[in-house]
Image (spheres, rainbow, N blue to C red):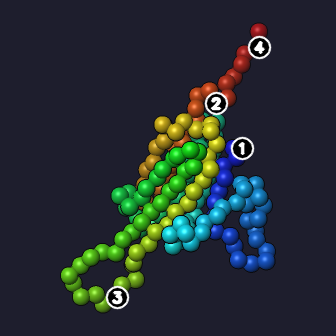
Amino acid sequence: MLPVQVRNRPVRSSWDPFREIDRLFNGWDQTPEDGVLGAYPVDVREDEAHIYVDAELPGFTKDQIEITLESGVLTIQAERKPQETNQQKHLTERRYTKVARRFNIPNLVDETNVEAKLADGVLHITLNKREEVKPRKISVK
């Protein structure tokens, strides 16, 4: 397994079912200084050639999502600004929202070869591993 570090807001209780996961992945420090109003569920998995990140971002369009990969840190951020209208509002429950997650990605990833696709409210990111770190079959002579 790759040492992908998952950052997540800590659970506020005496028993934390994710304590072992946080210990394995070196924790997460989402603070109010980040300006983040919330987080979202993410799955991270890998195979021999890729690391896959699937993030639930319901209600966001691809234009509202920003993905960066810099110095081994993958940042997924989504922001929905309030809609300006001249119409009289009777009920406004969908307001400004900004969410973000950061992941420390091992240097096995080819940072120039990353794919992202938004489908049905789920962002699918495929990080391709560099060729030199992929497993190779060696024949015995």
Q: Which residue is mark 3?
A: 91
Tell me what residue is drawn at x 53 percent, y 58 percent. Answer: 55
The CA span between labels 1 and 4 is: 26 Å
Percent x, y for residue 26? 72, 56
Disc 2 is placed on an element classified as loop
What is the three-letter code of the residue carrying label 4? Val
Identify the mark at residue 140; answer none if there is no mark: 4
Element type at mark 4 = loop
Residue denoted by label 2: 134
Identify residue type, mark 3: Leu
SS for callout 1: loop
Q: Earlier in the sequence, mark 1 or mark 2?
A: 1
In the rendered structure, the answer to whether residue 31 lies left or right of residue 36 reads: right
Q: Residue 21, can we see it?
A: no
Q: Earlier in the sequence, mark 3 or mark 2?
A: 3
Identify residue type, mark 2.
Lys
Q: Which mark is residue 1?
A: 1
Locate residue 41, reporting x and y percent.
57, 64
Q: Earlier in the sequence, mark 1 or mark 4?
A: 1
User: Where, by quadrant of the figure, is residue 54 drawn?
Assistant: bottom right
